[in-house]
Structure formats: structure tokens, C-alpha cells
Image (cartoon, helix red, strand yellow):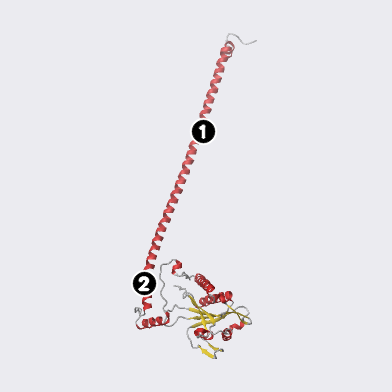
Amino acid sequence: MAIYHLSVKSISRSAGRSVVAAAAYRAGQELTDERQGLTHDYTRKQGVEDAFIVAPDGADWAQDRNALWNAAEGAEKRKDAKTGREYELALPAELDAGARKELARDFARELVARYGVVADVAIHEPGREGDNRNHHAHILTTTRTVGADGMGAKTRVLDVASTASAEIEHMRAVWARQVNAALEWHQVEQRVDHRSFERQGKEQEPTRHMGVSATALERQAAREIPGREPVTDLGKQNAEIRERNGVLETARKAVEKAQELFSGLEKKARQAVGLARKIGQRMEREREVERQRKELERQAEIRREMQRQQEIRAAEEVQKALELEYHRRPKELKKMISGPSRDRGPSL
């Protein structure tokens, strides 16, 4: 899986180091330190996959590696001066060489844009005897801004303790974002995180830093007897830590699986409740429609009965009126009812 690593350290005269020598070694080239009068030839160095320089606009002269780092040395007068700053990056093995190069270039551009320095990038292949996934880059930057006329002011923001920690943390976060963006672009599922396990909320225990000597001893032991147990104290401690982390990781995955199962059951239960609610609402609507239909039928029946009663009362009123009129004028009504007299003949 993709591994996060970014470390920052200084090239300082107080440690007896030359930034010209450091640049020559990382790029696998021959450079001459004019201040010391020494030539550093690393052209036979193997494992340098690529090397290039990213400089601010207008500082084309800085593309000459020998001129650049001699200018960096010449700009410093103090015996304990910091002449360079190195960023060591782990490049994702999941990406191809071209993608790893562009990723390292993007981070170098970010350094140049933020601090105004020049960044000398060297991409190294994994060592022959180490982890074959250990693709990495060394980015050597100046400690001063660089312009068309040469070296400028010191980048104090990275030298003062009150601001250096925050700046380094910022660049660590930038590198994590860039790596994750590249992994996503190339459709790789893994992601990295620049934060510690504690800050991520993980219960894993970090392994101890092995160092060069302990790592060399472990590699030698592994070559002699493949699969051999660690031989150094640090190696044994890290093996125990990895074993404990493995147990924790297994437990974490079990908990996640249980949570996923519970979440699935909970989702299905919510869906069942929602379906039952919808069915209940539909049945209630159907009952309401039926109730309204029956109410309309009842009201129609009432109206029909009222109409029938009105007709009956009207008929009764007519009957009463006829009877009353019959009693008031019985002779005339009788004649009207009986018709013409049978004794009378036709009129002449």
C-alpha cells in the first residue's frame, strides 16, 4: 500500500557538510566545490532515475547545477551557516515512473512558489537489497530566495523555531494532498495521511526508527537466512509492535464488519418501517375515500326521501283543497262530476 513519508533536514557547515557535495551525490553527477577546491564525482552512482531543477521565473542561470550550489555556498559567510535544505519524499510504488516524476515536480513547484527558492530534484530507485517499493525523491533547496541576479534574502520562516514547525506541518499536509490526488487520478484506491496515528484517532503503535546501522544489520541477516527473526533490539521491538498492530487491525476490521452488518440490518429495518408506513397511509386514504363515498350515498338518500315526503305533502294538500271545495259547492261539483243530464235531448 502507499506509504507516507516526508522528512526535512538542513545541510549545515557546522556538521562539516558541503551543499555542493550533497547535490552531486543526489544527482549522481560531478560537481566542484569552489570554496573548498574539491571535486565530488558521483557519476558512477547507481539508482538515480532522474534529476532536474525547478527555479523561479527569470532565474534561468540556476538550471546550471554547479553554478547554483556554488552560489549558495558563496552567499554564506558564517562557519555554521545552513547552505541547503533537503526534503526526502516517499513516492508511491503504485504509480509509474512518469507519474512519480510529475508528483515530485509538483511538490518542488510548491516549494519554489511558497518560498522563492530553487529546488534541485533527484529521483532514486529502490535499493537493490532493500524494499523494492522504496521509490523516493530528494529535493535539495536553497536557504535563500533566488532571482535573475543571483541569491537573495534568507528564508527565515524555515529557520526560526516559532514558524518552522508550522511551515513544515503545512508542507507535510500539501504533500499528502498531492499524493492522494495523484493516486485518485490514476484510479488507485489507497490513500496516505500525514498525521500521526494518534491524531488520526487510530490505536496503532508507531514503530521505532531503525537508523542506518540497525537497518544494515537486519538486511544482512535476512540475506543470510531468509525469514529469520530480527537480530537487533530495535528490529525485535518493531516486530513486536507490528504483531500488536496486526492484532489491533484484525479487531478493528471485525468491529467494522459488525458495524457494517448492523448498519445493513438497520437500513433494512428502516426500509421496512417506511414501507409499512406507506402501506398504512395508502390504506387510510382508501378508507377515507370509502367513508366519503358512503357519506355521499347517505346524503343522496336523505335528499330523495325529503323529495318524496315533499311530493306526498303536496298531494295531500291538493286532496284537502279538492275536498274543501267539494263541500262548499256540492251541486256545481256534482254536475261537473256527473256530466250533462240523460233526460235532455239534443239541442235543436
Circle 1 residue: 300
Residue 176 against residue 223 in the figure, above or below: above
How far apart marks 2 and 1 lie (CA) works out to 85 Å
Q: Which of these two is toward me, 78 or 302?
A: 78
Looking at the picture, tell me which residue is in the foreground, 167 or 220.
167
Circle 1 packing at 10 Å, graded few (<14), some (14-19), many (20+), is few
Residue 88's spot in the image, x, y percent? 49, 78
Mark 1: secondary structure = helix
Measuring from the top left, give residue 28's x and y in whole percent: 51, 85
As drawn, the residue found furthest toward the top would be 343
Quarter of the image that includes the C terminus: top right
User: In the image, what residue type sits under mark 2?
Assistant: Glu
Residue at disc 2, secondary structure? helix
Is residue 182 shown left or right of residue 211? Answer: right
Residue 141, placed above or below residue 37: above
| Mark 1 residue type | Ala
Residue count near mark 2 (Cα–Cα under 10 Å), binned few <14, some 14–19, many ≥20: few
The residue pinned by badge 2 equals: 243
Res 310 visible = yes
Please tell me which residue lies in front, 285 or 197: 197
Q: Earlier in the sequence, mark 2 or mark 1?
A: 2
**Could you tell me which residue is drawn at 37 percent across and 75 percent down?**
237
Q: Residue at x 36, y 70 (%)?
A: 244
The quadrant the N terminus occupies is: bottom left
